[in-house]
Image (cartoon, helix red, strand yellow):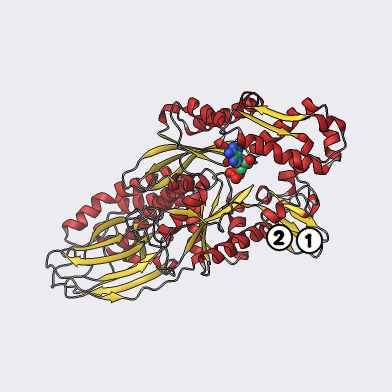
Amino acid sequence: MAKISINIATGSLQQAEMIVGIDLGTTNSLVAIIHPETKKPVALKEHDSSSLVPSIVHFDEYGNASVGEVAKGFLETEPQNTIFSAKRLMGKSYNDVKNNAGFFTYKVIDDNTESLVKVQVGNQFYSPIDLSSFILKELKQRAEHILKTPVTKAVITVPAYFNDAQRQATRDAGKLAGLDVLRIINEPTAASLAYGLGLEKDDERTIAVYDLGGGTFDVSILKITNGIFEVLSTNGDTYLGGDDFDRLIIQHWLKEIGLTEEELHTNKQLAQTLRLIAEEAKKHLSSNEVFEFTLPELTTNDSRLSTASLRLTTYDFNLLIAPLIEKTITSCSNALKDAGLTTTDIDTIVMVGGSTRVPAVKNAVSTFFGKPVNDSVNPDEVVALGAAVQADILAGNNKDFLLLDITPLSLGLETMGGLMDVLIPRNSKIPTKVGRQYTTYQDGQSGMRISVFQGERDLVKDNRKLAEFNLTGIPGMPAGLPKVEVNFLINADGILVVTAKELRSGVQQSIEVKPQYGLTDAEVEQMLLDSITHAKDDIQTRALVEARTEGEQILTVTEKFLTKNASLISKDEMLATANAMQALQLAITMEDKNLIQTKTEELNEVTRPFAERAMDAAISGAMKGQNIMG
Ligand code: AMP
């Protein structure tokens, strides 16, 4: 028995290496790992401080950047130098964001309206990728400081609705920060992982992930089957979140005090103080009925302020935010509609984002879906924790769990005519095992070359050769009689094991072949990324590619057969075959899978009678491409 061991997914990865999970959020970001002792995901924090790093970058007059809490302190006082919500600009042109230009207190520009935006601070220009890289660098340093070890590899999360450009931008930001981004995963997928969903082999369920953060809201409907997460639909509002709750509280108080919003705008200090108190009130009301704050503590000489006290009850707060909650519920309803589901189809609801701590939000979601929600994991940390779970699986530390992975490229053998015979198509779930029988091509053939290739092309010369070995010692038999079973097995670690055995004689050989990697991490990642973002398209593309591969295989084999067996075929048959081949050739150049299949079937129909004749004449044809080169 010959064995080849190839780590196709994580080729260069070291077992002991620490891979961190990063939630690069609009409002806050954080980094998490699997605790080496408890084996549970934990968010990293310095001593008593919060695990959350505000996603804010401040530049001083010399262009030095500070990130997080320090930068947050400059939000109100130096708005033009303090960049928040850079995530909203990722992969965007000015055209994309101009409707919300008023949202940004700093200068967002571009050269022409189609190119990607930049942020101007002083006379420096920063791309959203640069800005995100500052945040990621801070997280990397923080993790290194806490873990006391270099951190170079990460899994980073993005919203499920992020397009290719936005995912690529996130990946680039990681690279700029000195991180090897092993995987970009969807935030709702990460949140589900943090709850252990999808980690059991047979876990099949439909999940709604409701994510209400500081500035954004989204809901995703996911389906998990055999460890594969498929995003069925997403919906939401990228300008709706806890900050809006704070704003409503401020407006409510301003009305009570008798101040206008314009007056507040002219007093930056008061605006900042009120914003902080409003947020405190909101958080307080998540576990209390009343919030009270006496204003005299404010240093102001405005008489309206010195006499007023800030008070808010849960009842009033709920009334204020009811329209916003209602908006999120409408989004949930639309997401379900897009997924072709109803509330009863949802098995599990996962809550994400700090604003889901608001009891009225929880109740509304639970009432809508008719089920209690999952909120036991800290909603600020749940995404990063899930990213850490994914990172741990990638690191190969978590052997009990199914690897949530898919084969990035198809794996197969070289068959007759230099064709790629795919045993494990790309995007197959891992672990997987596929066996196929082959036979010899020449009488008395005693050896068989097994060449393993990886790639999507029909001819092996266009794909990558991973390994090769010879199964020798097959006893002399007429061509077509030996039965060589080749098995491809990808285990949960992403290791491919190829075995070959001749079944009639039982001959098997042990030949260890050194794997030949030809694949850079970036290429594998790109494939993984594509397969995550285009899960649905990929299935269609694969079907088309497979139909084309099969069509082309049939064409090649038919052509060979015709030259070899011309004497057995009548003129009419030859003409009919030529016509059918031409029709198939034409179909293959088109995008219609069904047409290719129909034309393939038609060619098969035409050739079947003389193929059978040829078989009867004991000529070992190989209409199905089952012969391996001798
Ligand atoms: P995130 O973007 O997920 O970090 O969420 C941050 C948002 O959650 C901010 O608007 C916070 O004010 C809000 N938040 C955090 N804790 C609470 C709480 N206990 N009650 C209500 N909102 C909260």
Secondary structure of the residue carrying numbered label 1? loop
411 up-or-down from 199: above or below: below
Location of residue 459 (image quadrant) = bottom left
Label 1 residue near ligand 1, CB within 8 Å: no
Label 2 residue near ligand 1, CB within 8 Å: no
Residue shown at 25% from the left, 66% from the top:
499
- Residue at point 38%, 45% (across, down): 198
- Picture layout, residue 321 above or below residue 219: above
Q: The N terminus lies in which quarter of the figure?
A: bottom left
Q: Kindly report the distance in space between the C-alpha atoms of the residues bearing marks 1 and 2.
A: 8 Å
Q: Is residue 187 left or right of residue 564?
A: right
Task: Specify few, some or many for label 1: CA neighbours under 10 Å numbering under 14, 14-19, or 20 or more.
Answer: some
User: Between 41 and 518, which is closer to the camera in this rendering?
Assistant: 41
x, y percent for residue 344: 41, 27
Amino acid at pointer 2? Ser
Q: Amino acid at mark 1?
A: Asp
| Residue positioned 84% across, 41% down in the render | 267
Q: Quadrant of residue 281?
A: top right
Mark 2, residue position: 66
Question: Could you say where residue 50 lies in the image, as x and y percent from the top left?
Answer: 58, 52
Q: Which residue is mark 1?
A: 60
Q: Say which of 402 and 517 sits in front.
A: 402
Q: Quadrant of the C terminus?
A: bottom left
